Image (cartoon, helix red, strand yellow):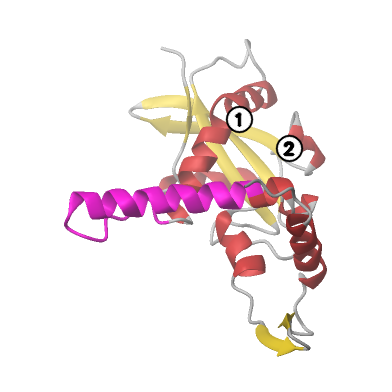
Amino acid sequence: MVFTITVKKTTRVRAAIVRLASDPATVWVPAIGAEEDKGSEIAEGDFCFAGRSLRMIVRRQPTKAGDQLSFGDLDGWRFHAIITTIDAHLRSGTEVEHHHRLRCGGPEEAIRQLKGDFGLCYAPVQNFFGNWRWWHAAVLAYSVGSWLRVLALPTEFASCRGERLRLALLNVAAKVVRRGRRIVLRLPRAYRHAEAFVAALNKLRGLPTFA
């Protein structure tokens, strides 16, 4: 059976990634496709899964200022791993990772954000229809965030997680005041994303209105 699977970062997986990343003999090669522009690199090693020795292909992506950091980051890199039964003689690690990302990356990322950033993994009430409304609201919030990135935000936010979007642009400690019969939003002077916030607001105001 041939498969490629994104592996959850369990203790064993993290340890395998750290060993691979810390080994001076590890060869990192540039990723293919959109990840190449981000500076991502690919390396691979062995991983024991269900009693079998499989290829573990790891993509490391450089973190940038403002990214939401995680405990799995190492020396300024963020790591993603997959395991596969595809033989190395048939496809290189970069080809397998690129195909896996095109085939599964989008849906998996959407599910990950819905569960981790928008609360789809919760059923907060006992009544089914109450939870059904909660899940609809979660999907609606995810869709609004996706359209916000597409229609208004600069490229640095094009693929950001919902959590970063919320912390950087939605949960802003601003003040609403009235001046000259106008409502004014005062942003803090130290707010680092003020330029992107104002540009996005102007783009949204410039969108056509449909009755």
Q: Earlier in the sequence, mark 1 or mark 2?
A: 2
**In the drawing, does residue 117 fall left or right of residue 147?**
left
How many discs mark residues in the rendered view? Answer: 2
Q: Position of residue 96 (x, y in %)?
A: 62, 22
Is residue 134 one of those drawn in magenta?
yes
Task: Name the residue located 42 percent from the left edge and 32 percent from the top edge.
Answer: 48
Judged from the image, the secondary structure of the residue bearing numbered disc 2 is helix
Per the image, the residue denoted by label 2 is 35
Look at the image and give the residue range highlighted in magenta: 119-147
**In the drawing, does residue 176 fall left or right of residue 182?**
left
Task: Name the residue located 63 percent from the left edge and 11 percent from the top edge.
Answer: 89
Residue 59: name its quadrant: top right
Task: Name the residue located 52 percent from the left edge and 41 percent from the top edge.
Answer: 110
Q: Amino acid at mark 2?
A: Glu
**In the drawing, does residue 167 fall left or right of residue 111?**
right
Cβ–Cβ under 8 Å for marks 1 and 2: yes
Is residue 19 one of those drawn in magenta?
no
Viewer-proximal residue, 10 or 211? 211
